[in-house]
């Protein structure tokens, strides 16, 4: 499977420093920053620094180091937001939209970390 990546997407521009962002955490391979249109009191986007378009692209082609770094970054974001259920936080939800049916707007792999209020059920009936 050949994956394509368009480096003119808005998150690629954020990674290149061409547009500003509200960074929460930066690591060797990942960047976490606040969503510009938050859906919850805490709405953080976690992205890999590498050129991956969708979650499946990242999961299948990223290095072990990138995947470990990304997963740990999500965990650290939950910790930083005080959202960890294990420490009395209210919890959180992760969402990664991939492609047309999921209405992915930005074609650079990202996970939304949503927290800060009750989130309801994951999907509305079709
Ligand atoms: P998607 O639908 O692709 O899963 O979500 C893309 C997300 O990126 C949306 O929640 C949108 O608000 C956010 N977003 C789009 N442009 C920008 C931007 O320039 N800066 C930030 N911080 N978030 C953005």
Image (tube, rainbow, N blue to C red):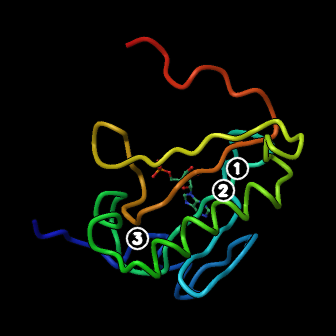
Q: Which mark is residue 43?
A: 1
Q: Are marks 1 and 2 in contact (CB under 8 Å)?
A: yes
Image quadrant in which you'd find residue 75: bottom right
In the depicted structure, whether residue 104 falls above or below residue 108: above
Front-most of residues 111 and 73: 73
Q: Which residue is mark 3?
A: 9
Q: CA distance from mark 1 to mark 2?
A: 6 Å
Q: Where the N terminus falls, by quadrant?
A: bottom left
Q: Where the C terminus falls, by quadrant?
A: top left
Mark 3 surroundings within 10 Å by alpha-carbon count, few (fewer than 14), some (14 through 19), many (20 or more): some
Residue 17's spot in the image, x, y percent? 59, 87
Which residue is drawn at the image coordinates 68% and 80% (left, top)? 26
Q: Secondary structure at mark 3?
A: loop
Task: Give the mark nearest the N terminus, 1 or 3.
Answer: 3
Which residue is drawn at the image coordinates 68% and 56% (left, top)? 44
Which residue is drawn at the image coordinates 54% and 25% (left, top)? 122
- Note whether ligand 1 is within 8 Å of mark 2: yes
Residue 89's spot in the image, x, y percent? 86, 41
Which residue is drawn at the image coordinates 60% and 79% (left, top)? 19
**With 95 as the anchor, is 83 left or right in this view?**
right
Q: Determine the residue located farthest toward the right in the rendered image.
A: 88
Q: Which residue is mark 2?
A: 35
Mark 2 surroundings within 10 Å by alpha-carbon count, few (fewer than 14), some (14 through 19), many (20 or more): some
């Amino acid at each position: 499977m050949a994956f394509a990546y368009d480096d003119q997407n808005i998150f690629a521009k954020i990674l290149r420093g061409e547009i500003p962002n509200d960074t929460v955490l930066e690591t060797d391979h990942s960047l976490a920053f606040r969503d510009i249109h938050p859906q919850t009191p805490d709405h953080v986007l976690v992205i890999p620094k590498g050129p991956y378009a969708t979650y499946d692209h990242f999961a299948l082609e990223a290095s072990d180091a990138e995947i470990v770094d990304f997963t740990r970054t999500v965990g650290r974001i939950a910790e930083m937001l005080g959202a960890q259920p294990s420490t009395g936080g209210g919890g959180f939800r992760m969402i990664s939209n991939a492609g047309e049916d999921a209405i992915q707007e930005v074609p650079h792999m990202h996970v939304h970390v949503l927290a800060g209020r009750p989130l309801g059920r994951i999907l509305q009936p079709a």
